[in-house]
């Protein structure tokens, strides 16, 4: 079950938000009465409640907003108990001062906004002596081990225990605590109404991550990076799981630089079967893998890890996606899909450009690399046996295919282009790997002069689809994934 936290400054707004949450399917709601700017009217808030309610009044030292004295705050909690709120949240240190009464259940809570203490078990044991119906332990995750210890605590608890970690590193514990026996987890009313660090919205918990459907049989996958909150991969994969009725959960996993082996070994113990890899971990993922394939070794980076038969396998699906995207664009333009012998100019020398160079070398094209930093272009060209062209001279090259592997033109710099319109020729296929926005200035100008084009959205979806097949053995459907991504981008970057 998901307990949805709502904090509003006025009673009327709190009640209205409460009703809206129930209409959206909330089954348990936490009313953060410390947010109300005057003394809370508990009777008014609980009158005709449509679903069970948790009353919480958090003091300033616990990152709450209570404005009055501690005596007044405890009086509010006693009032909630007398009014028979379904649950009342009471901090451990005042539990003895707030007696049990009537049918209200006691949530005895502990919060730590700095760390996950080494003595979690001792803290839990201390709290079980406070006459709780539910123990709630919420700490801050500083490492993957903190999440692991917290989930094991929840699993081994003799008293029903809500336990998870805050912060972006702790997201995984919020999503998995029910799998380990927590009676519920917490979510924010919406994406802007967080009442604790790292809290996910109710809509995301319910619909995207399908929290209530996660069991011990649910297969676990994820995306690793730092930061990771912006990633669209959880949306793509979890939506595809739902569309094909696959019992899987795809998690956002934040890993600081240098911690890839430690974190993946830890989460392997939780049942993690595979991960997508994004910045800045693609090289570390290759080094971590027990069995890297030819594609990832050629590129020098892996964007996919799969745990199978006790070992980690690495590949790079950007490699395949680039080739398939180009061939699809050539076929749509009624041109030969055979890339061999074609002259390809690749702009950039970063991760995407590197994958493009490796893919084009395999396809036996003639590759030229152009990059603002000539040294990086020269180093990449030397590694793959390619030619280079100075950045200021890139418009003088006659090529069959132009691939933009830079971030030029990406939102919010949508008026920028890495290749001037005057240099475009209708014989040239233009492939822009940027996918936000979907129609970059480069692609718009290329179509205006009659060039066939390929976009970064198709490449992104194709690489994700290959990952999905490696993870699950199922085809997610390119068109379905594209529709999911396009809608998400329109919502996140309107007008981009």
Image: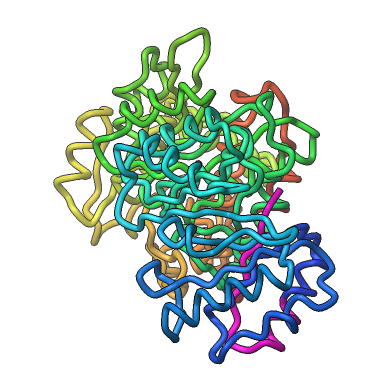
| Relative to 271, residue 441 above or below | below
| Relative to 57, residue 52 above or below | above
Taking the image as shown, residue 298 lies to the left or right of residue 435, namely left
The answer to whether residue 13 is magenta is yes
Observer-nearest of 237 and 93: 93
What span is colored magenta in the figure?
1-17
Identify the residue shown where x is 28% and y is 50%.
Answer: 370
Question: Which residue in the rendered view is the most extreme toward the top?
Answer: 309
Question: Which residue in the rendered view is the most extreme toward the bottom?
Answer: 38
Residue 390 position within the rendered picture, expressed as x and y whole percent measured from the top left:
21, 53
Residue 358 position within the rendered picture, expressed as x and y whole percent measured from the top left:
38, 30
Residue 211 position within the rendered picture, expressed as x and y whole percent measured from the top left:
68, 44
Image quadrant in which the C terminus is located: bottom right
Residue 418 position within the rendered picture, expressed as x and y whole percent measured from the top left:
37, 63
| Relative to 44, residue 414 above or below | above
Observer-nearest of 397 and 221: 221
| Relative to 235, residue 442 above or below | below
The answer to whether residue 229 is magenta is no
Identify the residue shown where x is 38% and y is 23%.
Answer: 265
Taking the image as shown, residue 208 lies to the left or right of residue 152, namely right
Identify the residue shown where x is 54% and y is 64%.
Answer: 98
Counting labels gives 0
């Amino acid at each position: 079950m998901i307990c949805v936290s709502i904090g509003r400054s006025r009673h009327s707004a709190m009640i209205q938000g409460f009703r809206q949450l129930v209409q959206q399917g909330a089954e348990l709601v936490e009313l953060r009465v410390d947010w109300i700017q005057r003394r809370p009217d508990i009777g008014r808030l609980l009158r005709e409640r449509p679903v069970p309610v948790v009353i919480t009044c958090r003091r300033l030292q616990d990152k709450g907003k209570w404005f009055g004295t501690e005596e007044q705050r405890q009086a509010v909690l006693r009032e909630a108990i007398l009014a028979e709120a379904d649950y009342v949240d009471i901090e451990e240190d005042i539990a003895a001062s707030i007696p049990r009464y009537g049918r209200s259940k006691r949530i005895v809570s502990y919060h730590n906004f700095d760390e996950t203490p080494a003595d979690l078990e001792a803290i839990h044991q201390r709290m079980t002596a406070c006459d709780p119906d539910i123990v709630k332990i919420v700490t801050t995750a500083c490492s993957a081990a903190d999440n692991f210890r917290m989930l094991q605590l929840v699993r081994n608890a003799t008293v029903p225990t809500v336990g998870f970690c805050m912060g972006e590193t702790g997201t995984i514990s919020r999503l998995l605590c029910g799998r380990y026996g927590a009676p519920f987890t917490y979510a924010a009313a919406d994406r802007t109404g967080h009442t604790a660090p790292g809290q996910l919205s109710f809509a995301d918990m319910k619909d995207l991550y399908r929290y209530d459907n996660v069991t011990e049989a649910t297969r676990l996958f994820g995306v690793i990076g730092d930061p990771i909150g912006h990633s669209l991969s959880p949306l793509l994969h979890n939506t595809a799981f739902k569309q094909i009725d696959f019992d899987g959960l795809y998690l956002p996993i934040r890993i600081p630089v240098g911690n890839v082996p430690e974190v993946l070994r830890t989460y392997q113990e939780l049942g993690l079967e595979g991960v997508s890899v994004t910045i800045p971990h693609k090289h570390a993922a290759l080094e971590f893998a027990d069995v890297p394939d030819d594609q990832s070794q050629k590129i020098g980076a892996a964007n996919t890890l799969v745990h199978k038969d006790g070992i980690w396998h690495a590949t790079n699906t950007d490699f395949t996606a680039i080739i398939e995207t180009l061939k699809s664009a050539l076929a749509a333009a009624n041109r030969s899909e055979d890339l061999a012998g074609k002259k390809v100019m690749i702009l950039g020398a970063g991760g995407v450009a590197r994958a493009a160079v490796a893919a084009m070398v395999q396809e036996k094209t003639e590759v030229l690399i152009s990059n603002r930093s000539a040294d990086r272009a020269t180093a990449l060209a030397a590694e793959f046996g390619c030619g280079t062209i100075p950045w200021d001279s890139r418009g003088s090259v006659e090529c069959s295919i132009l691939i933009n592997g830079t971030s030029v033109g990406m939102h919010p710099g949508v008026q920028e282009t890495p290749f001037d319109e005057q240099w475009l020729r209708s014989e040239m296929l233009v492939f822009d790997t940027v996918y936000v926005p979907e129609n970059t200035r480069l692609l718009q100008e290329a179509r205006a002069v009659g060039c066939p084009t390929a976009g970064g959205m198709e490449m992104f979806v194709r690489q994700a689809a290959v990952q999905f097949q490696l993870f699950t053995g199922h085809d997610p459907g390119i068109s379905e994934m594209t529709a999911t991504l396009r809608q998400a981008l329109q919502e996140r970057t309107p007008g981009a």
